[in-house]
């Protein structure tokens, strides 16, 4: 362990942080539901935003992967980026499979 790191405080603070975030999320969701914020327009905007973000993330990962391969020899950074890219693509495959079953 590192000096100055208190495991007890960490173990008490981590669940407390999750609890506070869950309470805030619950009340904001409830308020949004009452104000009808989550209609078809909301879903269409956020579906488009997620797909745009996915494309941008894919491009950034590929560019970063190329830069790492040029600057550094094959090492930890290469394998970390490869793993992130593979998980990114696998999540797309799983999401596409789920979406194709629903529609």
Image: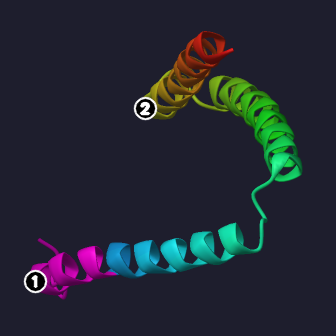
Q: Name the residue that disc number 2 marks.
A: 76
Mark 1 neighbour density, 10 Å: few (under 14) some (14–19) many (20 or more): few
Residue 72: x, y in percent? Answer: 59, 30
Report the residue at 50% width, 72% height from top.
26
Res 95 quadrant in image: top right
For the residues labelled 1 and 2, the Cα–Cα distance comes to: 32 Å
Q: Relative to 1, is 32 on the left or the right? A: right
Report the residue at 58% width, 25% height from top.
85
Mark 2 neighbour density, 10 Å: few (under 14) some (14–19) many (20 or more): few
Q: Relative to 41, is 2 on the left or the right? A: left
Q: Nearer the viewer, residue 31 or 3?
A: 31
| Rendered image: mark on residue 8 | 1
| SS category of the residue bearing label 1 | helix
Residue 30: x, y in percent? Answer: 59, 73
Q: Relative to 74, is 2 on the left or the right? A: left
Report the residue at 80% width, 53% height from top.
39
Q: Nearer the viewer, residue 5 or 68?
A: 5
């Amino acid at each position: 362990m590192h000096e100055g790191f208190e495991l007890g405080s960490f173990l008490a603070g981590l669940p407390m942080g999750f609890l506070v975030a869950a309470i805030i999320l619950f009340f904001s969701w409830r308020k949004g539901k009452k104000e009808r914020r989550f209609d078809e327009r909301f879903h269409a905007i956020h579906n488009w935003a997620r797909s745009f973000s996915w494309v941008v993330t894919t491009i950034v990962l590929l560019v970063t992967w190329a830069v790492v391969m040029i600057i550094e020899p094959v090492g930890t950074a290469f394998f970390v980026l490869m793993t992130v890219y593979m998980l990114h693509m696998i999540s797309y495959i799983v999401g596409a499979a789920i979406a194709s079953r629903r529609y």
